[in-house]
Image (tube, helix red, strand yellow):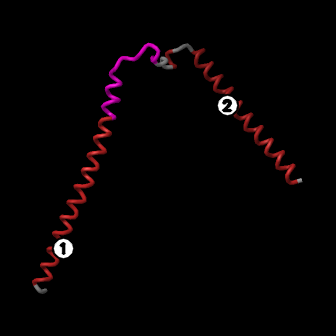
Amino acid sequence: MPWWIWLVLALFMLGMIVAGLVYAGIYGLRALKDMSGVAEQVGERMSAMGEPAEAGDSPEPPLFTQPLSVAQERYADTYVAVLRRKAAKRERHTQAWSRWKRFNN
């Protein structure tokens, strides 16, 4: 092979290496900028966890530490809500069915 072909190949290789380094540098700087924002958010949340809670902000104690009647009441309330949603859904379907029957007859 003539010497000038080797020169073209070597220049092409060097050009690709430089382009790769520029590409990696640009996206590396962009990633650093994004990570600094994430680190700032994490720092804010970590400092908020270290602050004492206000009196009105205290969470409810875990359910397993409360009397069984509390869990029973919650379950009953939730079950009532589920039954109401099912009844409302059934009512909507019944109304839609009656409208469909009127429309098609």
Residue density around tag 1, few if under 14, some if 14–19, many if 20 or more, within 10 Å: few
Which range is magenta?
41-58
Q: Position of residue 37 (x, y in %)?
A: 31, 40
Q: Is residue 22 above or below residue 15?
A: above
Q: Is residue 43 above or below residue 14?
A: above
Q: Is residue 70 above or below residue 6?
A: above
Q: Which residue is mark 2?
A: 82
Residue 55 belongs to the span the image colors magenta: yes
Of residues 90 and 11, the one drawn nearer to the viewer in this rendering: 11
Which residue reaches farthest left? 3
Q: Please tell me which residue is depicted at 32% across the width and 34% down the height of the picture.
A: 42
Q: Tell me how far mark 1 sits from mark 2, CA to CA.
A: 69 Å
Q: Position of residue 91 (x, y in %)?
A: 77, 37
Q: Please tell me which residue is depicted at 48% across the width and 17% down the height of the picture.
A: 61
Q: Position of residue 54 (x, y in %)?
A: 41, 15
Quadrant in which residue 15 is drawn: bottom left
Of residues 60 and 63, the one drawn nearer to the viewer in this rendering: 60
Q: Is residue 76 left or right of residue 23?
A: right
Which amino acid is tagged 1? Phe
Q: Which residue is mark 1?
A: 12
Q: Is residue 80 left or right of residue 44?
A: right
Which amino acid is tagged 2? Val
Of residues 7 and 90, the one drawn nearer to the viewer in this rendering: 7
Q: Is residue 25 left or right of residue 81?
A: left
Q: Is residue 1 above or below residue 18?
A: below
Closer mark to the observer between disc 1 and disc 2: 1
Residue density around tag 2, few if under 14, some if 14–19, many if 20 or more, within 10 Å: few
Circle 1 SS class = helix
Q: Please tell me which residue is depicted at 76% across the width and 40% down the height of the picture.
A: 92
Q: Position of residue 79 (x, y in %)?
A: 66, 27
Residue 105 belongs to the span the image colors magenta: no
Which residue reaches farthest bottom? 2
